[in-house]
């Protein structure tokens, strides 16, 4: 499946490294209990097998050009979902991580 980014900007295909990690596209879900408000949500919480959320989309690009020999270092606030997602997916790919 071609990513929407590459459909919109085909010149990036092959130039911008991408590593599929998530289950995309994620569905839109209508919230029945708030039906009179016509509220829909994008279910990115089910985007990944290790960790869900929009961080998986970012990691598909951030981890695409790394090799298991690389040490990955990142920072985040206490309880950072970015740090959790990075640690989980980096470990799956054989990377060592340092989180600040």
Image (cartoon, rainbow, N blue to C red):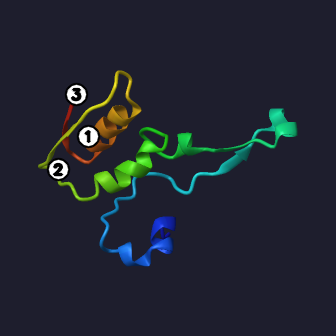
Q: Are marks 3 and 2 in contact (CB under 8 Å)?
A: no
Gap between marks 3 and 2 measured at Cα:
20 Å
Q: Give whichever of discs 1 and 3 has the lower sequence position.
A: 1
> In this orientation, which residue lies closer to the viewer: 85 or 92?
85
* Residue projecting furthest to the bottom: 11
Q: Mark 3 points at which residue?
A: 100
Q: Furthest residue to the top?
A: 78
CA gap between label 1 and label 3 equals: 17 Å
Q: Distance between the residues labelled 2 and 1?
A: 9 Å
Residue 57 screen position, x and y as percent: 43, 51
Q: Read off the residue under disc 1.
A: 91
Earlier sequence position, callout 3 versus callout 2: 2
Residue 59: horizontal and vertical position, in percent? 35, 49
Judging by the rendered image, the residue that carries numbered circle 2 is: 68
Residue 5: image location, x then y, percent: 47, 66
Q: What element carries label 1?
A: helix
Q: Residue furthest left?
A: 69
């Amino acid at each position: 499946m071609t990513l929407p980014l590459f459909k919109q900007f085909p010149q990036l295909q092959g130039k911008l490294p991408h590593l599929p990690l998530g289950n995309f596209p994620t569905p839109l879900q209508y919230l029945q209990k708030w039906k009179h408000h016509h509220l829909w949500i994008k279910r990115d919480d089910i985007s990944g097998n290790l960790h869900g959320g929009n961080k998986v989309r970012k990691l598909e690009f951030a981890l695409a050009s790394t090799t298991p020999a690389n040490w990955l270092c990142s920072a985040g606030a206490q309880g950072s979902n970015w740090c959790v997602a990075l640690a989980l997916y980096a470990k799956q790919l054989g990377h060592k991580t340092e989180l600040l």
